[in-house]
Image (cartoon, rainbow, N blue to C red):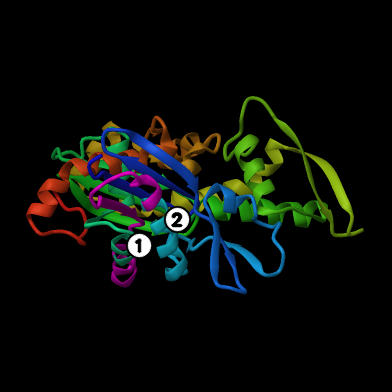
Amino acid sequence: MLGHDIGIDLGTATILVYIKGKGIVLKEPSVVAIDKTHNKVLAVGEEARRMVGRTPGNIVAVRPLRDGVISDYEVTEKMIKYFVGKAAKNTYFKPRVIICVPSGVTEVEEMAVEEAAKNAGAKFVSLIEEPKAAAIGAGIDIFKPNGNIVVDVGGGTADIAVLSLGDVVLSDSVKMAGDKFDESIIRYLKKKYNLLIGERTAEAIKMEIGCVYPQAEVQTMIIKGRSLTTGLPQSIEIRSDEIMEPLQECALTIVDVLHNVLERTPPELVGDIYQNGICMTGGGALIKGFDQLISQKIGIRAYVAEDAVSCVAIGTGKALEFLDKLEASGRGNKRFGNY
């Protein structure tokens, strides 16, 4: 088999791997389990996620990407190596790789990602910013002289970008996304019910009954945690309308940043955006009522892209079509430009 062209969505919560001609072939959590005693990687992805909160003292399950930035270079490199190796197995030639990174990454972090991909066996590496990949994956033709805006709510950051003529005109990023939504649920239950829950339970609450805008039907859910009063296991029933309070607080922070970006956007592009609407992508966009909240507060129609969770990976995959141009122009290890 010949070498693959591989696209990687390097998400804070989830890693998605796209292979040209095959689509998304891997989707696993951005978690690595490490044996601290021997400094050895024990598991990566889904297997490591199952260890979170359940490991003995010498084993730690870590997420090397936090708040949209790389918090542990060495572990990130091992994680990229694992995914590239898994995607490119049974190939004779080194793969070409395009990696999607948050818009707020520094040059040092870019170099770390590139180096990690090269060490993993990539012969050519290019980077693409998350909002640009999200827009491409959502089916928006970003190369037209037409203004579009994307709100990509991931695990670590919410990236907001105005795009036109194939590039980002204006962007902003806020460290208010999936992880912070989970943390707000944990704090709320601790304060109101004296109940301590873990990250996985908070995420389940967010996904099942979480909302940021009043819904027609109130949902309930039974959750289990530890009582801070007795120190013993406790089970309680919670309602979607009460969980709306902490989640809406987080969502409004993103709305404020979106408002600020629109205020700085050139008038002609604002006119286009008013007509085209606000495109929402990422797992955070799936929280019930998020599009309704934005539409109400901003006054422009907001909509959730089809397959919002995979938009960035699909866009990164579509950007693989431009790798020949990038490689021929010697633009390896550069950001994916206006092609």
**Quadrant of the rendered image containing residue 55:** bottom right
Please give the range of residues in magenta: 85-114
Residue 318, image x and y in percent? 25, 39
The secondary element bearing badge 1 is classed as loop
Relative to 235, is 320 on the left or the right?
A: left
Q: CA distance from mark 2 to mark 1?
A: 9 Å
As for residue 96 lying within the magenta part, the answer is: yes
Say which amino acid is labelled 1: Gly
Q: Is residue 12 above or below residue 315?
A: below
Front position in the image: 34 or 61: 34
Q: Which residue, as the protein is rendered here, is positioned at the far top?
A: 216
Q: Which residue is mark 2?
A: 157
Q: Which residue is mark 1?
A: 104
Q: Residue at x 32, y 64 (%)?
A: 119
User: Disc 2 vs disc 1: Cβ atoms closer than 8 Å?
Assistant: yes
Q: Residue at x 43, y 62 (%)?
A: 78
Front position in the image: 299 or 221: 221
**Quadrant of the rendered image containing residue 212:** top right
